[in-house]
Amino acid sequence: MPTSADSPGNAEPSKTYDVIVVGLGPTGATLANLLGLCGLSTLVLEREAAAYHLPRAVHFDDEVMRVFQTIGVAEEVTKTVRVNPGMRFVDTAGKLLLDWPRPQEVGPNGWHASYRFHQPDLEKILRDALKRFDQVDVYSRANVLQVEDRGDHAEVQYEDLASGQKCSAAARYVVGCDGARSLLRQLIGTEMEDLGFRERWLVIDVLLKQPKPELGDHTIQHCNPSRPSTYVRCPENRRRWEIAVLDGEESDEISSAGSVWQLLEPWLSPDEAVLERQAVYTFHSTIARRWRKGRLLIAGDAAHLTPPFMGQGMCAGIRDAANLAWKLALCIRALADDKLLESYESERLPHVREFIQTAVRLGGLINTCGTEEALRAALPQADGSARMESILPNLGLGPSAGCDTHRGQLFPQPRLQESGLMDDTVGYAPLLLADQALLNADELTQPALSEAGVGFLSTDGEPELGDHIKRMGAKAVLVRPDRYILGTAANKTELASLLAGAYPSPLNRTLNESDLKL
């Protein structure tokens, strides 16, 4: 496989890839790894010569770690991260206004609820993982110029920035993971919906020269109407501050070393740390109204931008990739109608909207002195409580099968009695969870399921798994490759309906247009 150091050249003009991914940030690298697991021929085009060497995103959650587990890199990722104890909102006097504790024990998804990380470390792990796949080509210094939907395929024109050569490649689908200024989004021709937050903030990353335990391990949101700010405890000796830029302040001036150290004075002095980066960013809250047009799709920052107050920006892009890859695989293999791809937007858009809206509300709280009014506006569900719980939105409308009461919920990942974490039993594939007697009653066999690409895990002898399913009022659950529930069944008849809806008898085809409830 070509490595990221290779000059792109002309990507085998006679070859039509299954998918071309534009952009090799965390979303693009995750998508390319999942497509590789699906066995799809994939070309990744990245404009830059190497991954960006400075930190950007600093948080991901347990659902994202499950995706990394699926890719096969979770163990390596855990060596580079720090478990996050939570976030606290304080007023100008340091009084606690709102507490968002994150459990320190492993949670229902099989991982800790919240992690702090260094993005260059993660990107290296994800890029190195792509070297496993002979069918995945990665070209750096490849600047995409134009993408055309030709009906039965898409053509991508790009420039090899090393040589100036104009090149082309073809694919069944092209996915733009090309960031906030996405070319693919422009070509789709979609408008951006503005959810009401647009502010400039100065982001400061430092490397401590010596321990500073008094800074604390929690993320601290300083709710101060005159100058809101955020402190973030990152891995090892890394620390971050995000400080609001006031109207009339020039970006160049406030990001100068002198201004930065003046702003950091309440916490840190120049002899205690080295400035690694300081830059002014505009935090946005926007969502593309359309995520797909024909053979062109967008994911990650190309599709949505969120203020950072929930730490969900990169998480949303990873979820996009996990939702999209298996659907592309089914469509490319003609195991599902192309209409299945419409569910990518219909499921993900309302899901990410809920995270962005919550982040906007929290931004409103941080910009105030933390009044009761502001607290209720930020967290109407808290009923005056000073404790915040993580939100767990369901997916929007999409494919379903069987009894779909729980459709669109993320299914937990218990540790099994003898075989480790549940997801490892199946990989990036659908998984039927049921007791063996119910499966036999429907005259289905494990080989038949396997032939249809469906994993099977018996709840016999797995009390934790069985309890999860019982609490849902079910005896069988069909879990999608992205770990969300497709449908449930409470008896033999419902199990037959569940499997027929997703993998119609005799289990030799998958979702078609009539099965989709969009």
Image (cartoon, grey):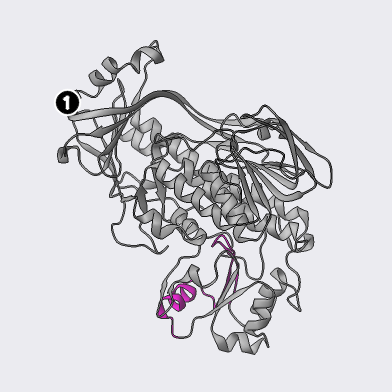
Report whether 273 appears left or right of 253.
left
- Residue 255 position in % (x across, y down): 35, 18
Report whether 199 appears left or right of 175.
left
- Residue 58 position in % (x across, y down): 38, 41
Q: Can residue 52 be seen in this view?
A: yes
**Amino acid type, residue under disc 1 in the picture:** Asp
Q: Residues within 10 Å of mark 1 (few under 14, many from 20)?
A: few
Q: What element carries label 1?
A: helix
- Residue 272 or 16: which is nearer the viewer? 16
Residue found 59% across the figure and 48% down from its top: 348
Q: What stretch is highlighted in magenta?
A: 461-489
As drawn, 148 above or below 416:
above
Report whether 353 appears left or right of 186.
left
Residue found 55% across the figure and 61% down from its top: 484
- Residue 465 or 445: which is nearer the viewer? 445
As drawn, 449 above or below 285:
below
Residue found 62% across the figure and 89% down from its top: 440
The image quarter in which residue 509 lies: bottom right
- Residue 315 position in % (x across, y down): 48, 46
- Residue 9 or 488: which is nearer the viewer? 9
Going by the picture, which residue comes out furthest to the right? 151
Residue identified by numbered label 1: 271
Residue 16 lies within the magenta run: no
Report whether 243 appears left or right of 444.
left
The image quarter in which residue 287 lies: top right
